Image: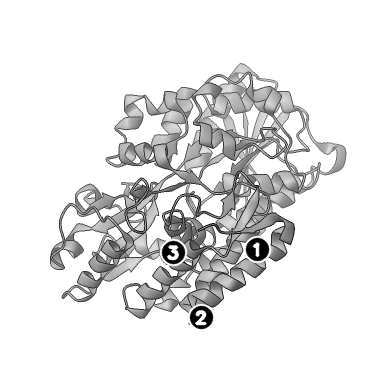
């Protein structure tokens, strides 16, 4: 799931665009604030989405669909509500909008990470009856459908994007350290050995980086500890789907924290200050990797969007300069490799003005052609087989087929309302180890925190 490196922004940075018959205008924040109570226009479809800094990829995707929709439905207006915010701030601001009938959007762009939490809070409504009539619903990957399905069996979103994770490695750094040009680590120890070779070479590069600590938010949980934990053995994840209980006392969890401890104790990673910099990802993408100042990075399928011609730091050489390797399991067991997948989709809030009209526009947003164009512009992995079969999609990036193929064996986070709180506890455990706590103490603190979050009746001890 992409986690933006952009700084926090105050509410006055939000702008609102309205499309009617293909014409866009900017509405001030006060215009939305004035739509309280019964003042909602039943002929206006309002869609809220996250905007990273000055990026307009999502806006252009929505605008393109809105222009066509407005031409077909001249009596209807589409109002765009881009929320310029970091990931966690976006969740908060989006929930504030959904909390009131006067400010609620009619469609919201939801991360699978937060979707069921918003369901539990009453912000979203089920759309099972609507998706049954959605063209290409049968083309959506089964794990992605599961991620938008709550415990009540109802569907609360239409998945659109997904992502997978792997090891990105800098070939110049590897060459300087005497490491192979085509690298395929078979275990965690192989990663550590490569990092040690970089450390001991003449290279000034940071050997290895994984996101860790509370300032990194969900990146730390998903690109960090979970990419380790889910490779420690079958059934060694966070949650037992069969018993519906959260797993405590996991040797895999402690082993994952020990790996984190090792990279700090052996000087195989960036400084603590760099790890705790909430904007470190921007530094990685715009300078450390392109300038051969970083050897190995665990990260997601989307990051090459930072090197396109229109990006802040174009890097046209990246396909030759960077290699990709599957993340290995702890000792090479199981499938031998591991990846985590996330993704975003569209949902209908509880306070929608007209759910049928909102869903009609949603259908326009998720047409095959529209999603192919969006995937190419946004550099993401699709959840749809019809989109993945298009030649334009398969050829848009040197890495797209590699990351799409990883979906076959991907794990998904437990998409439950309490997961965001559990995730925060993961980040705290990582930060405790980074700042000197033992893996055992940090794991015990995590177990206690999860028990408090979910209740003692909803936890179980890990099996051997």
Q: Which residue is mark 1?
A: 450
Q: Residues within 10 Å of mark 3 (few under 14, many from 20)?
A: many
Camera sees residue 343: yes
The mark found on residue 211 in the picture is 3
Circles 1 and 3 in contact, beta carbons < 8 Å:
no
Location of residue 247 in the rendering, given as x and y in whole percent from the top left corner: 59, 57
Q: Residue at x 42, y 59 (%)?
A: 228
Location of residue 151 in the rendering, given as x and y in whole percent from the top left corner: 69, 40
For discs 2 and 3, the disc positioned in front in the rendered view: 2
In the displayed structure, 332 sits above or below 292; it is above
| Cα gap from disc 2 to disc 1, whole angstroms | 18 Å
| Cα gap from disc 1 to disc 3, whole angstroms | 21 Å
The mark found on residue 437 in the picture is 2
Q: Residue at x 77, y 44 (%)?
A: 122
Element type where label 1 sits in the image:
helix
Location of residue 3 in the rendering, given as x and y in whole percent from the top left corner: 49, 54
Q: Residue at x 14, y 62 (%)?
A: 175
Element type where label 2 sits in the image:
loop
Question: Along the polypeptide, which appears first: circle 1 or circle 3?
Answer: 3
In the displayed structure, 145 sits above or below 274; it is above
Question: Along the polypeptide, which appears first: circle 2 or circle 1?
Answer: 2
């Amino acid at each position: 799931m992409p986690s933006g490196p952009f700084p926090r922004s105050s509410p006055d940075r939000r702008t609102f665009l309205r499309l009617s018959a293909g014409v866009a205008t900017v509405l001030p924040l006060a215009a939305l604030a004035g739509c309280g109570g019964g003042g909602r226009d039943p002929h206006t479809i309002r869609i809220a989405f996250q905007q990273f800094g000055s990026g307009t990829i999502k806006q252009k995707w929505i605008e393109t669909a809105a222009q066509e929709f407005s031409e077909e439905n001249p009596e209807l207006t589409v109002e765009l509500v881009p929320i310029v915010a970091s990931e966690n701030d976006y969740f908060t601001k989006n929930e504030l909008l959904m909390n009131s009938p006067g400010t609620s959007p009619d469609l919201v762009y939801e991360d699978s990470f937060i979707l069921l939490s918003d369901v539990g809070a009453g912000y979203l409504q089920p759309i099972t009856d609507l998706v049954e009539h959605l063209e290409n619903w049968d083309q959506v990957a089964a794990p992605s459908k599961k991620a938008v399905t709550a415990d009540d069996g109802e569907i609360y979103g239409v998945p659109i994007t997904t992502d997978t994770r792997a090891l990105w490695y800098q070939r110049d750094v590897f060459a300087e350290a005497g490491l192979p040009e085509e690298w395929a680590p078979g275990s965690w120890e192989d990663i550590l050995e490569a990092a040690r070779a970089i450390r001991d070479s003449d290279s000034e590069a940071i050997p290895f980086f994984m996101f860790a600590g509370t300032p990194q938010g969900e990146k730390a949980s998903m690109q960090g500890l979970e990419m380790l934990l889910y490779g420690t053995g079958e059934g060694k994840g966070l949650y037992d789907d069969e018993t519906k209980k959260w797993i405590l006392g996991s040797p895999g969890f402690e082993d994952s924290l020990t790996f984190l401890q090792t990279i700090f104790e052996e000087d195989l990673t960036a400084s603590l200050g760099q790890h705790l910099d909430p904007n470190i990802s921007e530094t990685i993408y715009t300078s450390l990797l392109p300038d051969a100042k970083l050897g190995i990075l665990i990260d997601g399928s989307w990051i090459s969007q930072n090197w396109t011609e229109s990006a802040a730091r174009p890097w046209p050489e990246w396909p030759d300069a960077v290699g990709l390797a599957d993340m290995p399991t702890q000792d090479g067991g199981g499938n031998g490799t591991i990846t985590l997948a996330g993704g975003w989709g569209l949902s209908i809030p509880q306070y929608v003005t007209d759910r049928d009209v909102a869903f009609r526009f949603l259908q326009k947003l998720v047409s095959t052609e529209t999603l192919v164009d969006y995937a190419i512009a946004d550099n993401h992995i699709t959840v749809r087989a019809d989109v993945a079969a298009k030649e334009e999609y398969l050829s848009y990036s040197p890495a797209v087929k590699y990351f799409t193929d990883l979906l076959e064996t991907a794990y998904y986070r437990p998409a439950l309302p309490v997961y965001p709180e559990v995730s925060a506890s993961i980040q705290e455990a990582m930060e405790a180890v980074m700042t000197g706590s033992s893996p055992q103490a940090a794991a015990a603190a995590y177990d206690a925190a999860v028990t408090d979050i979910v209740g003692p009746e909803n936890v179980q001890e890990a099996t051997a």
